[in-house]
Amino acid sequence: MRLFQFIGPEYGIQAIKDQRLKISRIDQLNDPFEMFAGTQSDRRTRFAMDVIRKSVASRLGVLCFSRDWHNPVMWSHYADNHRGLCLGFDVDEAVAMPVDYVSRRVEFDQYLDPATSESEVRALASRFAATKYSHWRYEKEVRCWASLDPDGPDLQFHHFDKHIKLRQVCIGFQSSMTRRMVFDALGDEMASTVSVMSTRLAYRTFRVVTQQNKKLWK
């Protein structure tokens, strides 16, 4: 499936050149309810959810994508007000977790005991990592797990691989970056498989679209 990640200008070219994406840590995402989508009606349940969240956050992060690159709000929030890039990837559906947007928190009355297996914890973690409040629906988010090095630095990256392949680069309409800069970052091998386009605001809708007049491409 084709998925998109918005990125600011200071990191966009570097991400392409290094062929890697920043791993977002669960406890540093902008939604305070990350992995707390379940109800927490008693102390035992709250303890279980906190254990799950901390256990996962120490070992796994997420790569965050959107199904849609046309939303101007996403460009404003995540690509430095249209000055950055939107990177399009072909992502293997086997590793993708489409986010389920809900208006009510999921009923959850489970607790963890010493017999709870790693696979059960992982299943619960995936369920809650892919469940968010309905007001985030505009993001049309899809996530992928990414392993963290527990002894590594706070900032860690996941390299493009057979499951996540760069296929498209959209340059924000207010960006100072040029297609030449993008192609230089891609290198000869990737340049032949990645399309690079300039964007503009649509004339009749609230969308960001491809700049069809190639004379205006940067």
Image: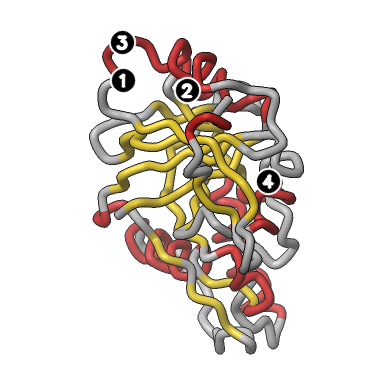
Q: Are marks 2 and 1 in contact (CB under 8 Å)?
A: yes
Query: Separation of disc 3 and disc 1 at Cα?
Result: 6 Å
Labelled disc at residue 188: 3
Q: Quadrant of residue 139?
A: bottom right
Nearest to N terminus: mark 2 or mark 1: 2
In whole angstroms, how far apart are the C-alphas of marks 1 and 4? 24 Å
- State yes or no: discs 3 and 2 in contact (Cβ < 8 Å): no
Do the CB atoms of the residues marked 2 and 4 lie less than 8 Å apart? Answer: no
Q: CA distance from mark 2 to mark 4?
A: 17 Å
Q: Look at 64% across and 76% down and name the residue there.
A: 133
Which residue bears the numbered disc 2? Answer: 16
Q: Amino acid at mark 4?
A: Tyr
Name the residue that disc number 4 marks. Answer: 78
Discs 3, 1 touching: Cβ within 8 Å: yes
Q: Which mark is residue 190?
A: 1
Q: Amino acid at mark 1?
A: Met
